[in-house]
Amino acid sequence: MIKITLPDGAVKEYEEGASALDVAKSISEGLARKVLAANINGEVWDATRPINSDASLKLLTWDDTEAKSTFWHSSAHLMAEAVETMFPGVKFWVGPAIEKGFYYDMDLGDKKIAEEDLALLEKKMNELARQNNGFARKEISKADAIKYFEAKGDEYKLDLLNGLTDGGITFYTQGQFTDLCRGPHIPNTGFIKAIKLTSIAGAYWKGDEKNKQLTRIYGITFPNQKELDEYLAMLEEAKKRDHRKLGKELGIFTFEDNVGPGLPLWMPNGTIIIEELEKLAKETEKAAGYKRVVTPNIAKESMYITSGHLPYYADSMFPPMEMDGEKYYLKPMNCPHHHKIFDAEQKSYKDLPYRIAEYGTCYRYEQSGELFGLMRVRCLHMNDAHIYCSKEQFAQEFMAVNEMYIKYFKIFGVDKYVMRLSLHSPEKLGQKYVNEPALWKETEDMVRKVLIETNTPFVEVQDEAAFYGPKIDVQIWSAIGKEFTLATNQVDFAQGRSFKLSFTNKDNHPEVPLIIHRAPLGTHERFIGFLLEHFAGKFPTWLAPLQVKILPISDKFMDYANTILQKLKNADIRVEIDDRNEKVGKKIRDTELARVPYMLVIGEKEMNEGKASIRRQGIGDLGAKDINEFIREISKEIKERSM
């Protein structure tokens, strides 16, 4: 018998060789019908795989991220089976699950798959899914695996096998399709109820443009049609909200070939949004005890060697410039400069926590294929700050940073968020991570403790920490449920030592401070990209580039329009007059399309009464109102940063 420990701590005995699915059936048949995979001792397994020793077990259903990943990986295999049925002789490279769905790279030889073939492939996938074929796992020797794929003439799988060793090679078979795969997979194809193949693309083998270009098919599947329909509706809405489309329509930003890829130019409307965000950040940080600093955009190579950015971060930095026999780099991060500011004056425990903030410009060499609108750029303006504190002060400071995030979420109407606690990987100490195992454990425990004590929703992710300490990546969801990575919050136990930073503690001894790196509003680029999609370009009044448009119904009311214009400008409200020779209906439609929060329509009656007819974006006519009363109301809305 073996002992299985469940998530609630309960321990149950089962016969050796029992599977997670057997455990689920012993609890309830209803639960068993929902189980897609299982977490066994921290590793995701097939729900049908035999368990031969004592283990901790968590049953995974569609609600679990690992289950979705398993579901989509199995769907990639199902698609490959359909492709092989329709295009005999096809050769496959890799077919992973991705954040939403899956893809498979394949070599079709002299054949081609067109967009119109996707519907036929979907039909074949549905047909195969209804066969309820199980995913059978088989351990196989390297020699037999090579023999199998040599017989198929599949050089791509043979290449994969070159990097594998005996004892760790497995095949998975469902129906008539067998693949080299480590798994895991769902119990059978019958779980896949709704299928959509979304696009076809080219992809170089191994990502190397010198290699052959393969065909990549993307798709997504769900356990029911309702979820697929909702997902496709969300995609359609997301297209309308695409920040690249809205950014161009609303005059927020632009790119220019002669400036360079990944280097956005901020138009006047975008610059207004930037200034409003910086104003918010400066007010918030001043109230929280931060001091503002300014640092240059370049630094000597020696500083980045000290910080560890060289060599750990070298691939993401622009090539160096050589001047006066020295190498200089565009700064990829603000932190080394801030450390030098901390070190410029002697500190005692009375000076801590020492908080400094800057909207610093950074430069990162993102690969061309990774650039994407404002979300992945090479020049970024970061809402950066660093807190230097003692270990005793850490919990309170870290908590205050989290509270700042929550405040911002409320201001911007972000209802769903989660913190991803990114941890190090012990086997990569000294390579990817600073080689301080005890300090890694201590700081990771400190961060975890604060998150638990503050009831902050978080998940843990291995092998994604910063090289100098654990970090929290803040995941937020837009109004239509699209996920974004907003910002990061990092704990650094290493750079204080690297830069020989210290303060005099209460015992009159030098002590190295802990450093918290935080950027609650991320970068202007990524955050404004998110806001464009979150609000669909309909910014709250305080953030809108243009807050009010005055619409006179004819030229004879222009003097009154200009009087209102001046009153609003004196109240620091962003306002313009639509003085075109157009009918008022067209002016209203155009102003709606420009997503201006308020319209003031004025004619004879309004002029005689000292009023304006107020229209609100997305709502319509609010009736006539005294101009001074309107100014009081909109000024209050702007000051309070109301949604």
Image (tube, rainbow, N blue to C red):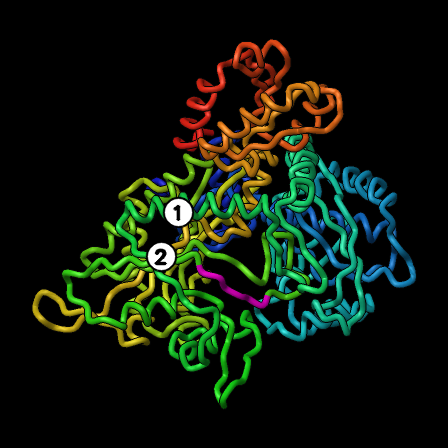
Position of 284 with respect to 310 (left or right) is left
Position of 25 with respect to 223 (left or right) is left
Mark 1, Cα crowd under 10 Å, few <14 / some 14-19 / many 20+, is: many
Q: Residue at x 7, y 68 (%)?
A: 507
Q: Residue furthest right?
A: 110
* Stretch of the chain drawn in magenta: 360-365
Amino acid on which disc 1 is placed = Ala
Front position in the image: 499 or 383:
383
Whichever of callouts 1 and 2 sits on the residue coming sooner in the sequence is 1
| Disc 1 element | helix
Amino acid on which disc 2 is placed = Ala
Tags 1 and 2 touching, CB below 8 Å: yes
Question: Residue 290: in sight, yes or no?
Answer: yes
Residue bearing mark 2 = 357
Alpha-carbon distance for marks 1 and 2? Answer: 10 Å
Question: Residue 191: in sight, yes or no?
Answer: no
Residue bearing mark 1 = 281
Q: Residue at x 79, y 51 (%)?
A: 200
In magenta segment, residue 397: no
Front position in the image: 212 or 154:
212
454, above or below 381, in the image: above
Front position in the image: 170 or 119:
119
| Disc 2 element | strand
Q: x, y percentage for residue 53?
A: 42, 55
Q: Main secondary structure of the magenta part?
A: strand
Position of 51 with respect to 85 (left or right) is left
